[in-house]
Amino acid sequence: MKLTKIVNSQLKDSMAFDTVGAAVDFVTHTTNRIISAFINQTLVQENIINLPAKVQEVRQDQRVLQAEIDYYNRREARKKEFLQIQKILTETDLQNTVDQDKKEERLQQIQREEIEDISKLSILYLDLSRETTASEIALKQQEIQGIFDQQKWPGVLSRDEAQRIFVDEQKKPRLLMLVPPPDISDDFPISFRDSLKKEIRNQLKLFLEKYYPLGSDFCPVEFYGKYFERSVFDAEVKQLETILSAVPTAIIYTDITDHEIYFNVRFWGLQEPVSLSFEPLNWEELKRELEEAGNDETKSWRAIRQTIVILHKLLAAFLADWYYLNINPNYEPQLFNLSSDFPSIWTDKMIEKLKLIRQTYRNIYYNELKVSANSQKERPKFWRCVNTLDGHSDQIFSVAIHPDGKTFASGSADHKIKVWNIETGEIIQTLTGHSNYVRSVNFSTDGQTIASGSYDKTFKLWHSLKGKTFIEHSGAVTSVAFSPDGKTYATGSLDTTVKIWDLSNEKLMYTLTEHENSVNSIVFSIDGKNLISGGCDQNIKIWNLKTGMVDITITNQESVNTIAISPEGKIFATGSDNNTIKLWDLATGDLIHTYYGHTNCVNSVAFSPDGKTLASCSNDKTIKLWHLGTKELINTLSEHSLTVYCVAFSPDGKTIISGSADHTIKIWQHD
């Protein structure tokens, strides 16, 4: 390798650059090996690749779909305004300096808004990528005891440390970077061995904390260096993967013999694990060239150590950038901004390939956003009333549709429950027994049982024309709900409590008592693990049904009249006395969006089965249909003459049923 001239030309630069010439062939080969392992260059160049599987998985979530469509629409509006202002600034002779300054300030503001939007999306992608691994992590936590009992883990990773990694991963997503001390031949001086281990650990720690801080919303990396007291080997790395397979992880480990340096990488967390071993770097040749260039032995050893450290940084930076680019198409790799940390001759090719894959991902990503946004702007369905039913003699407070979609039940102020044929509008059954308003009705999961709650302070379970009466509440029973698995049901009451019942023996299991005022609405989560309740204390509570405790309390600032869970179970909607409908994140309790449009309090909300539409009804006599993607008002149905108290979608999404204070039930269908 005739690189002495190159080495000599670098001697006046910093120590980090002394070894550019001597190591350039190794770095070039290593770069090619990394790129070929992670990127199919042919597919990228021909622009026929898809977005990464991790991105596609996260983007199936309804919350992401909504956020992306909102972002795309705002982005297009900003682009249009930006171009208009630029045109004015370049083509118009603005005499007023103040006007010009305002327009330039607006251009800067538009750029800041774009950055803020991308930041919010990035945070969402990270959070949901963590959610997708939550179940796998929970399973690993259960398995970990047996794994550690059955296998020997000689100081590589303790049981407690593994548990902590799992707990931290569930709190905040990050890439785990494991870098154990290199395995160094005893032929090296002790000072070299000790210094190299410390330099790798300390310099890599500072590097990652600077460019990939754990608190970052874009590219958090948790570095593990000092934890490892000794080197690890291939078999032990595979053991680590057995434990940590649910946690995105990169391991960089090196072996240094009496004449060569071997770099190894193991990476998992996206698709199939990647294992790389690179052609060795001949440190003897490197040392000889450094000494021939005029370096003394101490300086040559130092330059070799620094070369090894920089190569660790380069590998760590690429692995982190590659991981986050595969989660977030908007991610800007940090390597693009690290010219002062790496010789350009080492990084040029790697950066070139990263830029190519980033641009390819973005082209696909923005095209998909455009298609999604445009599809949401299709002509909305036109809903029309196809039947008006007047079998009740008083206000209708509640309707519930049978799981088979053929019949529905209604509860009324006339103290009666009626079961109807949806297609014909005929009354099939009339259930009597309550002595006051029937406030709520609902079908069990199998459709065999109807539950009803009443202002007579009782609720009933109807298995036929006769119902079993329960008198455990001391106030009106305002809401009844069955769990998805059909094993339990819940009742909410003006007595401020929620009661959970065993459906098999129809016995009370326990009472939830955290509300300070009337409970108006309750609903089970799709997985049955949580129950959501809301009421006149202006609070929404998300209960953990395993513990009977409140996981999250949300302050709504107005009485909560109604709650509905989305079909995929990640979000829920509420309607309130302040005329608004709000969307909430079930996992975090965060507010996602507020719909404005009703002019009076909202009494009932319901999701369409496909999760694209939300229906709401109000004291303003209307039913409104909202698009969950664009957040737009799609339709207003206004044929009721008085307050509309309840609304429900049929299982196929083709029918809406509403009940009103005008004593009628209306059946709506779309063209």
Image: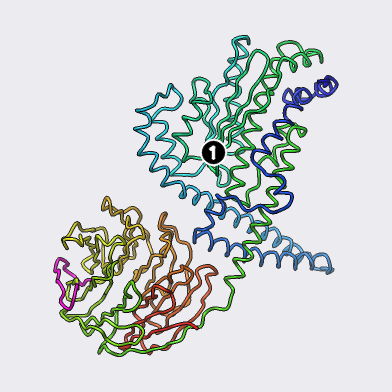
Residue 171 magenta-highlighted: no
Tally of numbered discs: 1
Segment colored magenta: 462-477
Which one is in front, 31 or 572? Answer: 31
Q: Residues within 10 Å of mark 1 (few under 14, many from 20)?
A: many
Disc 1 secondary structure class? strand
Give the quarter of the figure containing the N terminus.
top right
Which one is in front, 634 or 117? Answer: 634
Amino acid marked by disc 1: Trp
Q: Is residue 361 left or right of residue 436?
A: right
Which residue is at 83% across, 65% downward? 90
Q: How is the image coloured?
A: rainbow
The image position of residue 16, as x and y in percent, is 72, 25
Residue 321 to residue 491: above or below: above
Residue 474 magenta-highlighted: yes
Which one is in front, 257 or 544? Answer: 257
Q: Is residue 554 left or right of residue 502?
A: right
Residue 119 to residue 414: above or below: above
The image position of residue 137, as x and y in percent, is 42, 42
The image position of residue 197, as x and y in percent, is 58, 20
Q: Is residue 183 left or right of residue 25?
A: left
Find disc 1 in the rendering and name its residue: 268
Which residue is at 42% across, 87% downward? 385
Which residue is at 49% across, 52% downward? 128
The quarter of the picture where residue 607 lies is bottom left
Q: Tell me which secondary structure the magenta stretch mostly adopts.
A: loop
The quarter of the picture where residue 431 lies is bottom left
Residue 39 to residue 571: above or below: above
Q: Is residue 515 left or right of residue 640?
A: left
The image position of residue 263, as x and y in percent, is 63, 26
